[in-house]
Image (tube, rainbow, N blue to C red):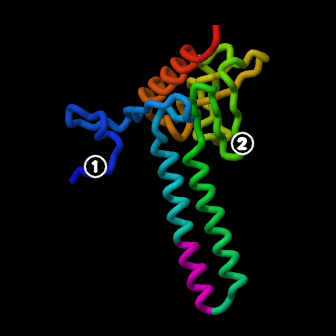
Amino acid sequence: MPLPFLTADRAFDVTGETSDDVALPFDDHDQWRRPYRPGPWRVGAAALLLLLASFVLLAAMIIAFTGAMPGAGACLGLAVVMIACALRLLRVGAWVSRHGLRRVGFFSTTTVPWARATTVRTVQQPVRWLGLPRTVQGQALVLFRSSGERLQLLTDHNADFLSRVEAFDRAADTVEAWGDEYRPG
């Protein structure tokens, strides 16, 4: 039973068909936007982490009812950390706005204004498979800064694009288009 009123697809779906890989529309170019949807691996990992956090919260409640408050506090603290990690995991990725490009990692965030970016392009190189130490040959969207540094934004083997080549191509083209539009000269 489809529930189109619960999705953002209804606003621009005129054919009645929904596609899972279509980017969400937006109007305000001053706000930071992710030009693609989070992938199934990333969403699945966050969902599992939230499921585990719910069990830890249940354990904290049971421990609190038995009267062991330090143990309940420790379980509550662990659940809060797990929820924060799940939310941060969902924020990881490349974000764009009129002001620049932002690469959000799990532990750090790097923002590069468009004035300091020379090019944004897709290159063939060894990339990490799901962020693990194992590398495979793949594609990466790389931002080249005016200082000569490279910043890897997306890969076709990360948690957003594993087994979704068309979605990676569309996201890379979108980020490159943002760069072409807002990068000076």
What residue appears at the point 53 percent right and 52 percent down from the top-left corner? 45
Image position of 1 (left or right of 164): left
Is residue 61 part of the magenta span, yes or no?
Answer: yes
Residue stretch rendered in magenta on the structure: 55-66
Outermost residue to the right: 147
Residue 14 pos. (x, y %): 23, 32
Q: Earlier in the sequence, mark 1 or mark 2?
A: 1
What residue appears at the point 58 percent right and 25 percent down from the top-left corner? 98
Q: Secondary structure at mark 2?
A: loop
Q: Residues within 10 Å of mark 2 (few under 14, many from 20)?
A: few
Q: Which residue is mark 2?
A: 108
Residue 99 pos. (x, y %): 63, 26
Quadrant housing the C terminus: top right
Return the residue nearer the eye: 55 or 163: 55
Residue 74 pos. (x, y %): 70, 75
What residue appears at the point 49 percent right and 45 percent down from the top-left corner? 41
Q: Secondary structure at mark 1?
A: helix
Residue 176 pos. (x, y %): 54, 19
Is residue 70 part of the magenta span, yes or no?
Answer: no
Picture layout, residue 180 above or below residue 16: above
What residue appears at the point 26 percent right and 51 percent down from the top-left corner? 3
Quarter location, residue 65: bottom right
Picture layout, residue 7 above or below residue 124: below
Picture layout, residue 23 above or below residue 176: below
In the image, what residue type sits under mark 2? Ser
Q: Which residue is mark 1?
A: 5
